[in-house]
Image (cartoon, rainbow, N blue to C red):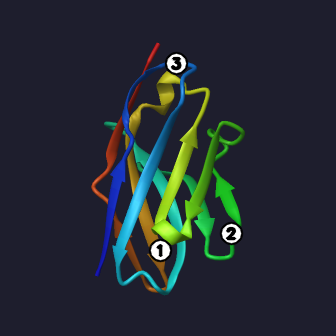
Amino acid sequence: QVQLVESGGGLVQAGGSLRLSCAASGSIFSINAMGWYRQAPGNQRELVARIYSGGSTDYSDSVKGRFTISRDNAKNTVYLQMNSLKPEDTAVYYCAAHFYGMDYWGKGTLVTVSS
């Protein structure tokens, strides 16, 4: 099994920055991709950013140019650097590990952006 632990959420003002971290442990040798997703109350979960095993990335149009996903393989950790935050970025952010045939999810970390 795989365990994912997110950290770094909090309360910031619009225009501020946060960096989220996701530490992975367990059977992580055959991972295909890691992703960040978010969900606000009453909304559907949406993809924020994803990084593949080869290093390529993709982003939601709503965060492109403001957020950056990266990883530190030695630490088994992925990051989401969030800049120029907007109130509409407020959500619970979830880390996901994507394997061929199975996904694992963290419990989430809350990001609140005040106007």
Crowd around label 1: few <14 · some 14–19 · many ≥20 (10 Å) = many
Residue that appears at 61% across and 76% down:
53
Residue 4's tag is none
- Are the residues tagged 1 and 3 within 8 Å (C-beta)? no
Numbered circles on residues, count: 3
Q: Rounded to the nearest whole Å, what is the CA distance between mark 1 and mark 2?
A: 14 Å
Pick whichever, 45 or 65, lies toward us. Answer: 65
Whichever of labels 3 and 2 marks the residue nearer the N terminus, that label is: 3
Residue beneath the point at 58% across and 54% down: 49
Mark 3 nearby-residue class (10 Å; few <14, some 14–19, many ≥20): some
Dot 1 or dot 3, earlier in sequence: 3
Compared across the picture, whether 53 is left or right of 31 comes to right
The answer to whether residue 41 is above or below residue 7 is above
- Tell me: 57 left or right of 26: right
Helix or strand or loop: what does disc 3 sit on?
Answer: loop
Q: Between tags 3 and 2, which lies in front?
A: 2
Circle 2: element type: loop
For label 2, count other residues whose C-alpha is less than 10 Å away and answer few (under 14), some (14-19) or many (20+). Answer: few
Q: What residue is shown with label 1?
A: 98
Q: Amino acid at mark 2?
A: Gly
On the image, the x and y values in percent for residue 91 come to 39, 37
Percent x, y of residue 50:
58, 60
x and y, in percent, of residue 39 in the image: 39, 44
Amino acid type of the residue tagged 1 in the rendering: His
Residue at 39 percent across and 62 percent down: it is 23
Using the image, determine if residue 34 lies above or below residue 59: below
Q: Which mark is residue 55?
A: 2
Amino acid on which the number 3 mark rests in the picture: Ala
**Which residue has dot 3 on it?**
14
| Secondary element at image label 1 | strand
